[in-house]
Amino acid sequence: MTATAKNSASPPAQQQSIHSLLSPKSNSRLIGISLALILFSFYSLYSYFQYLHYHTPSWDLGIFSQLAQEYSQLHFPPTVDIKGAGFNLWGDHFHPILMILGPIYALFPSPATLLYVQNALVAYSAYLVCRYAQQLVPPAGAIMLTTAYGLSFGVQNAVSVQFHEVAFALPFLCASLGHIVLSRKSVEPVTHLKRACYWAMPLAFVKEDLGITVAMIALVIALRAGTITCIHQRLFPSAALVQPLSQRLLGAVGEINSKDGSLHAVLLLFWGLIWSLSAVLIILPAHNNGGVFDYSDKLNLAEVLSDPLQSFGLLFYPWQKTLTLVLLLFSGVFLWVLSPLALIALPTILWRFLSPHEGYWAPTWHYSLVLMPIVFMALLDALLCTQRFAPLRYLGTKAQHLFAISAQRAQELTRMSFLWLALLVVIASFPSQPLWNITREGFLSSSLSLDERDKQQALESIPTHSSVASDLSLLTYLVPERQVFWIGDKTHHAHPEYVVIDRAGGGWGKSAPQNPARYAHEHFGGDYREYQRFGTIYVLQRVEQ
């Protein structure tokens, strides 16, 4: 009887399971997961062959690999010799979230591990973009928005220049901004605004400047919750209701306490500001060898405030800045700037373009990565307000009359048109982006060129557990199981057992040493002799006296 009862109950249970798998919610999740996996696979394919062919854009991956290695061995604070012999990286940038890399690197001790971690963060953020978009636009629109985000110029350039800590900001930004966007159409907007606050909080631990971004998120949340409007009315009432300043201040404080969600926004504002100020004024100088924040010269705030008109002009000149701004505008089909969420991009844009260091101005490198979630979530937010913006209202009306459809259907068609445009922008710009290198002959080949085989042999010739200084050619690849210094370090505190110089590369340009042994002697002291030579790569060994 028991067996019969079980068998009779089995078909309904199976049908229920099948129905749950085929439900719209499950299908939406499956689409999001599929897009994330495709992006992860695509970027990981690029990273694999980039790493295989010894392509080293900078020393950053080597630095973060040493940091991950230190954390994996529970060394606090972490010593990163590539930055300088005995350099304490806690005095360089404020990124405590990178402690997460410790256990991951312990399991997979390779610089390539960091590349796949970054790709996973990109993929997960794309999944979040898709899941939030699915609740607001048709499935096809969510797919287009996610694809445009995942293949945007900021993401592509960040992946191509390899790992940087800002990749950890992507999931938190997408989740926080996603909840802000959902609050516009939700029957419980306060719940979403509170969740946006919670998701924004960890951003302060990604990098010192992102605390200011957190503060901007708090302002947008306060704006969306109506807090700023209420505080303004309390502080600046009509002439008939003029009160003493103390009473107005108390009224504003009471408004914050009484309005649900406002206190969360205010606390988030202070959270972000406190962490950024603490990092720049206390934490980083305390761990820095010079007792200062090394990047304080990147932005002269007093000079910016003393001449606002000139500072505004500097946001567009030289032309690299304008190019980056145009790319940002086109990525969000110009519409994203109509959303209050666009304000969140201001801190990053300001410190980049008002800095005298031109490396920040161009659309290359990883500096636009944190802007991508803002651009595309702001685009989604703006598309939900087709009746508020005159151009969108005009397009909706035209579509309604042209296709003889309802106003609601016309609005949906307008939204989809802009999402198509966002995707077309990405497709049109793809040939000029880094990942187009995949189409280049030999990029996806597992065979090594003669130069790459020379690098492989040079790498294998250097004993593990030895100390070695290298140019960019093998810097990153030497990190596991060796103490690695950068050959360009000017502190002269390093005395490596081996020195690697690639006269045809390694970042030397036209200034490669004519006599590598003499260069090693002058730079590190002691005597060096040629230990091995592989093509243009010299491996020098320190001679004990």
Image (cartoon, rainbow, N blue to C red):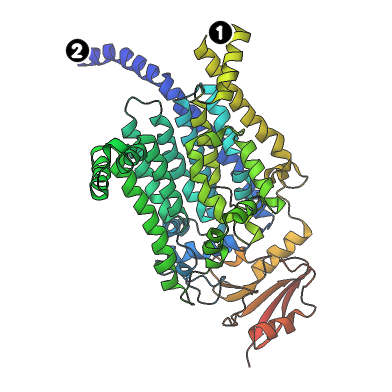
Instruction: Report the disc number at residue 195.
Output: none
Q: Nearer the viewer, residue 497 or 165?
A: 165
Determine crowd level at label 2: few under 14, some 14-19, many 20+ residues with C-alpha closer than 10 A. few
Residue in view at x 59 percent, y 6 percent: 404
Q: Could one spot residue 208 in this view of the protein?
A: yes
Disc 2 element: loop
Of marks 2 and 1, which one's residue comes earlier in the chain? 2
Q: Amino acid at mark 1?
A: Ile
Badge number at residue 405: 1
List the residue tagged with mark 2. Answer: 1
Instruction: Decide: is 55 above or below 479.
Output: above
Residue 157 appears at what percent x and percent y?
Answer: 63, 48
- Front residue of this view, candidates 305 and 536: 305
Q: Quadrant of the N terminus?
A: top left
Residue sitting at 37 percent across and 26 percent down? 186
Q: Secondary structure at mark 1?
A: loop
> Nearer the observer, disc 2 or disc 1?
1
Q: Is residue 535 above or below residue 16?
A: below
Q: Quadrant of the C terminus?
A: bottom right
Would residue 178 be found to the left or right of residue 3 on screen? Answer: right
Three-letter code for the amino acid on which mark 2 is drawn: Met
Residue 120 in the image: above or below residue 289? above
Q: Position of residue 469 (x, y in %)?
A: 63, 74
Q: Nearer the viewer, residue 301 or 158?
A: 301
